[in-house]
Amino acid sequence: MKPPGTVPAEAGEHRWPRGQTGTAYRPDRRLVLGGSLTLAAAVVVGGRALLTPATVSAAADPSAADHTSRIVLGDSLVRLVRAQVLVPEKLRAIYARRGGIPGELEAALKSPALEPIVLTRENAALYVNLLWPVGLANRMRANNNSPINGRMRFGFASVGGWTLGTAPNGGFDFNHHAIVVLTPEQDARAARVARATYRPCCDNSTFFQDCNHGSALLGLLALGAAQGLSEDDLYGEALAFNAHWFADQYRLSAVFFKSTTKREWAQLDPRVVLSAKYSSASGWRANVAGRGDGPGSRAAPSGPGCSA
């Protein structure tokens, strides 16, 4: 039985209601657990190709250094397991082919993790998949007005692609469980940041969590807000995690901003970098990967797809 709102795999695309778009769930692309997305593109400023990902120095690479977050997982994974949104055996089966789940994260499935998240190139993809169900299943007041919360809920990649729980489709768990307890103010704070942040695999904000990266980042923002982080702190965390999840894209972004603003990555305003202009799929292609507004400029190369 196919989840409601999906189309047969052979159809190749999702039929969205008029005026609504998103990353569609395709049954043959359910759970892709891999590294950051790769894009063989060059930053173009004034019509001149500056460099490709392979030529960016480590000093200009936002994902070169590990990121010690101010956010902890706490008991979020324990709650996911109790709610059967996440079945540990299913997660272990996937990572058995990749050397297993790191010990500290294996422990977090059974008891609260109170140490700050340390995000690395090696574990970045795993954190996408640990935070994905947090954002998907967590009950938020703001989600009552989410674009996901409608009759097409089961058809988005973020929900239809989540198959590591007991429900046949993540849509059954959407906004349904108290995974991260938020006060009204914390809920609103996380939602404000989510509505203003984007990722280079989609043209929708984090709040419109139509793919796994959107769900994961919304889960991170909820955790951070619940733990007392300010909006500025949340923007900083969102950029650090996006920069590890989309390493090639933000590596080029770092060089682009250095070339155009003379500022190092650490000096940039995360609100600007994460805006639709510079972090949405179309914005990144038009304004970072290729500039189409100057003499001699060329069209932007194709951007990344969403691994969901």
Image: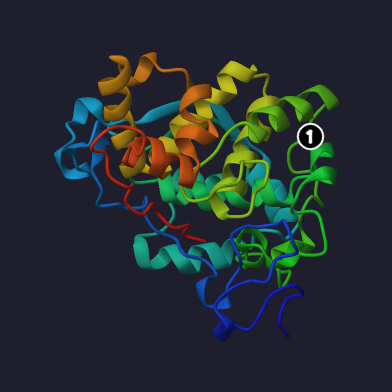
Query: Can you say which quadrant of the picture contains the N terminus?
Result: bottom right
Q: How is the image coloured?
A: rainbow
Residue 42: name its quadrant. top left
Q: Does 117 sit above or below residue 86?
A: above
Q: Specify whether residue 174 is in view.
A: yes
Q: Residue at x 39, y 58 (%)?
A: 34
Q: Residue at x 70, y 59 (%)?
A: 85
215 or 104: which is nearer to us? 215
User: Label 1 neighbourhood size at 10 Å, few (<14), some (14-19), many (20+)?
Assistant: some
The x and y percentages for residue 290 are 32, 41
Q: Residue at x 34, y 31 (%)?
A: 66
The x and y percentages for residue 45 are 25, 31
Q: Does 48 sit above or below residue 149?
A: above
The x and y percentages for residue 271 are 53, 23
Residue 150: name its quadrant. bottom right
Q: Give the residue type that dot 1 points to.
A: Val
Q: Which residue is mark 1?
A: 181
Q: Specify whether residue 63 is in view.
A: no
All told, the count of numbered labels is 1
Under circle 1, the secondary element is loop
Residue 181: name its quadrant. top right
Horizontal arrangement in the rendering, residue 27 relative to residue 245 (left or right): right
The x and y percentages for residue 195 are 67, 34
99 or 189: which is nearer to us? 189
Horizontal arrangement in the rendering, residue 201 relative to residue 66 (left or right): right
